[in-house]
């Protein structure tokens, strides 16, 4: 059992070497651990996959935190890869305390969504267009507007700072918008296709 593990502490917003209390390894060689942050003493639960180095020694990879708040939120496979990368990087920025960069990355992901769905526009014009074409509804439009404003605070020299709470909210809005536009729409289309296939069969 390793005595220390490298994991991101969400309270300290830094990567820490946490003292491992207990581990459980499953059949797939994933090691689940309960550790304690050396700085704020918070409990941290997560997993890591050990790998063999060039000398055949087992080494632990940087751990993925599962609780509190997973370090990597579930991003649906229907979301385009480039946007997934931006969202993942934004998550990493937040866990390292770089909040303005997280807001800028979320804005970039939103720009990609606009470009793919309604063509080349500024974020502000693109959002109006997304709503006009009913890709998003009023509530998502409002969330996206909040994201756009927060992204501008992060991207430009202003007196205002992106706080940790605002960066986290912006990230949550981004994931929700992408889930709605890609993941759920995808699911709904498949559902409708399945339904019409079954009804076609029953009418035969
Ligand atoms: Zn800590």
Image (cartoon, rainbow, N blue to C red):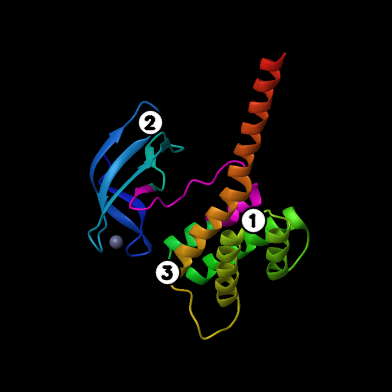
CA separation, marks 1 and 2?
42 Å
Question: Which of the marked residues, 1 or 2, is nearer the chain's N terminus?
Answer: 2
Q: Is residue 95 or residue 29 the one in the foreground? A: 95
Quadrant field for ligand 1: bottom left
Residue occupying the point 58% across, 43% down: 184
Q: Is residue 97 placed above or below 66 in the rendered structure?
A: below
On whether ligand 1 comes within 8 Å of the CB at mark 3, the answer is no
Which stretch appears magenta? Answer: 65-88
Q: Which residue is mark 3?
A: 164
Per the rendering, the mark at residue 29 is 2
Residue occupying the point 22% across, 59% down: 41
Q: Is residue 72 or residue 112 the one in the foreground? A: 112
Q: Residue furthest right?
A: 119
Question: Left or right: where does residue 131 sit relative to residue 164?
Answer: right
- Residue 153's quadrant in the figure? bottom right
Label 2 crowd bin: few (<14), some (14–19), many (20+), radius 10 Å = few
Q: Which residue is mark 1?
A: 136
- Residue 30's quadrant in the figure? top left
Rendered location of residue 149, percent (x, y): 58, 73
Question: Left or right: where does residue 76 sit relative to residue 200?
Answer: left
Q: In the rendered image, which quarter contains the C terminus?
A: top right
CA separation, marks 2 and 3?
35 Å
Label 3 crowd bin: few (<14), some (14–19), many (20+), radius 10 Å = some
**Label 1 vs label 3, nearer the camera:** 1
Q: Residue furthest bottom?
A: 159
On whether ligand 1 comes within 8 Å of the CB at mark 1, the answer is no
Q: Residue furthest top?
A: 204
Instruction: Give SS at disc 1.
Output: loop
Question: Which of the marked residues, 2 or 3, is nearer the chain's N terminus?
Answer: 2
Q: Is residue 149 placed above or below 88 in the rendered structure?
A: below
Label 1 crowd bin: few (<14), some (14–19), many (20+), radius 10 Å = some
Q: Is residue 86 magenta?
A: yes
């Amino acid at each position: 059992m390793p005595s220390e593990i490298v994991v991101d502490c969400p309270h300290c917003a830094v990567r820490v070497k946490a003292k491992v209390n207990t581990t459980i390894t499953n059949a797939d060689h994933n090691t689940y651990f309960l550790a304690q942050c050396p700085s704020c003493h918070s409990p941290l639960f997560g997993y890591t996959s050990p790998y063999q180095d060039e000398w055949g020694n087992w080494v632990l990879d940087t751990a993925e935190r599962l609780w509190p708040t997973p370090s990597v939120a579930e991003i649906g496979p229907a979301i385009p890869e480039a946007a997934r990368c931006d969202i993942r990087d934004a998550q990493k920025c937040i866990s390292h305390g770089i909040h303005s960069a997280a807001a800028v990355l979320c804005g970039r992901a939103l720009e990609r969504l606009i470009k793919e769905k309604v063509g080349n526009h500024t974020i502000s014009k693109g959002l109006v267009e997304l709503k006009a074409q009913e890709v998003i509804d009023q509530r998502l439009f409002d969330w996206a507007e909040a994201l756009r404003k927060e992204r501008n605070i992060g991207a430009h020299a202003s007196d205002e700072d992106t706080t940790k709470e605002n960066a986290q909210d912006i990230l949550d809005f981004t994931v929700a918008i992408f889930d709605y536009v890609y993941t759920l729409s995808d699911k709904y289309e498949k559902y409708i296709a399945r339904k019409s296939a079954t009804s076609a069969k029953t009418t035969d």
